Image (cartoon, rainbow, N blue to C red):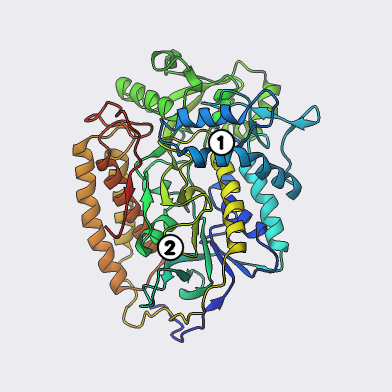
Amino acid sequence: MNSRNTTAQPSLQFDVLIVGSGLAGLSSALLLPTSKKIAIITKRAVTEGSSGWAQGGMAAVWNKNDTFDAHVQDTFVAGAGLCDPAATRFVVENAPKGIAWLQTMGVPFSQEDGALHLTREGGHSARRIVHVTDATGAAVQRTLIDAVQKAPNITLFEQHTLVDLITTDKLGLPGSRCVGLYALDSDTDEVLTFQAPQTILATGGAGKVYLYTTNPDTATGDGIAAAWRAGCRVQNMEFIQFHPTCLYHPHAKSFLISEAVRGEGGRLLLPDGTRFMEQHDKRLELAPRDVVARAIDFEMKKGGFDCVYLDISHQPKTFLLEHFPNIYARCLELGIDISKQPIPVVPAAHYTCGGVLADLHGRTDIKGLYAVGETACSGLHGANRLASNSLVECMVFAQAATSDIVQSEDAPAVTLPAWDDSRVSDADESVVISHNWDELRRFMWDYVGIVRTNKRLERAAHRIALLQGEIHEFYSNFHVTRDLLELRNLVQVADLIVRSAQARHESRGLHFSRDYPQLLDQAIPTTLSPRA
């Protein structure tokens, strides 16, 4: 048995708690006044979130030949009519300001002739993608992590996993306000109590609910699940974006081939070299992601192929080294010279378009609780996210949420109870967790993937109910571990995805149902409430 500290520790006191260390979380911490005492809680190393994996860039109107209206319209088209007009315009109009702030922080955006170099990606009607070659997220993360580590008012808690939010109604107090959270310190196996009048959830998406994903191992829907358990509504969880082009190779886990490769002329080919997108959409390889992913899925199933191919070899090698140095190097490590041969690719779960319902200030249904970035459903993405709108969303809503926090009234002081694990024991069979994790990811891929049916969703719902029972029993009787907490959250998110998919009786954007192939006249969000 592991030795444990059974002495209850006093709660750790802060002004603002930020859960997650991607662009949304780090930006929020740095945008708050230095007078605020801030904790950033992240379950692995600060560098291991999804933001650092983002290759393409950040979409913003930066060119005199481009307009806000055009960016809004492109977002609406990609979102299949479900984007919230106010949220979309809010993000588009504030995107340049967010990028300008990153420039002041020292992010080395790619330049051309003394100005920002703009590239184009699928679904965009103009070149408006600001980037750092093909590793934008990594460059932004490096810059912001360096700034956070130098900030005296910010404390970084790495290897700390969110267990649950603490709300006044859970404590039997009046109102519904978030007053803190419990987090597991993986180094000591101790659950700590964090207290603050304001909490920002910036935990990213839930791509690890699927067998194949471009997301890192941290993407287990922790913030979405915790907010749901605390009483927040979620919206549009059926819309999971599958990126069309994930590198298909046994030694290349989750490596993404950027949208920008198609933006710069990359062609999708069958194994025999036939170009096929013209059979599916007049925009060819520059169609929105849902269209391209379904086309690849169709061709793979029709031909029984393991993958298709993305060919950019007609571009000069100097061009490829300048625009895609990381993709070129990674592929070459695996024996693929992209200047001479096509890249094997498959679709993979990439982005969670839905999430915790949040307003234009990032506020959720619970006072003092904010959701920012992929954790949130701001209304921007609708039924399908437009390429490179996600990092910008992180920036814009980090600014909006922190501005709201600064103007918020002080919350009354509350005494929080320490985590009580006196009546549980150490688990003797961790294999149960790994087996359930594997089962969940496989049936979600098979039954709740790119193409869905009523029968597949029913099968998934049945299995989820069984898993929820097992996990609840495990959670109630044994000490929590990071693996158990992540599995608990993934199963909760899987349940929300399936319930949302079952509620949508049409095919729209990323949700394609063989039983409801038509598009309804009215675009209505899917909203689930834990209080219903």
Task: Please give the name of the residue rendered at 34% of the width and 57% of the height, measured from the top-left corner.
Answer: 434
In this view, 443 is above or below 488: above
Q: Position of residue 360 (x, y in %)?
A: 52, 49
Determine which residue is flagged by label 2: 366
Whether residue 255 is visible: no
Determine which residue is flagged by label 1: 388
Q: Position of residue 87 (x, y in %)?
A: 51, 42
Q: Earlier in the sequence, mark 2 or mark 1?
A: 2
Q: At numbered mark 1, what does the secondary structure look like: helix, strand or loop?
A: loop
* In the foreground, 435 or 66: 66
Specify the amino acid type for callout 2.
Answer: Ile
Q: At numbered mark 2, what does the secondary structure look like: helix, strand or loop?
A: loop
- Give the number of callouts: 2
Task: Please give the name of the residue rendered at 36% of the width and 41% of the height, measured from the top-left corner.
Answer: 525
Residue 352 relative to residue 499: left or right: right
Residue 354 relative to residue 455: left or right: right
* In the foreground, 365 or 213: 365
Task: Please give the name of the residue rendered at 67% of the width and 29% of the height, measured from the top-left corner.
Answer: 118
Q: Nearer the viewer, mark 2 or mark 1?
A: 2
Looking at the rendered image, the quarter that the C terminus falls into is: bottom left
Whether residue 334 is visible: yes
* In the foreground, 106 or 262: 106
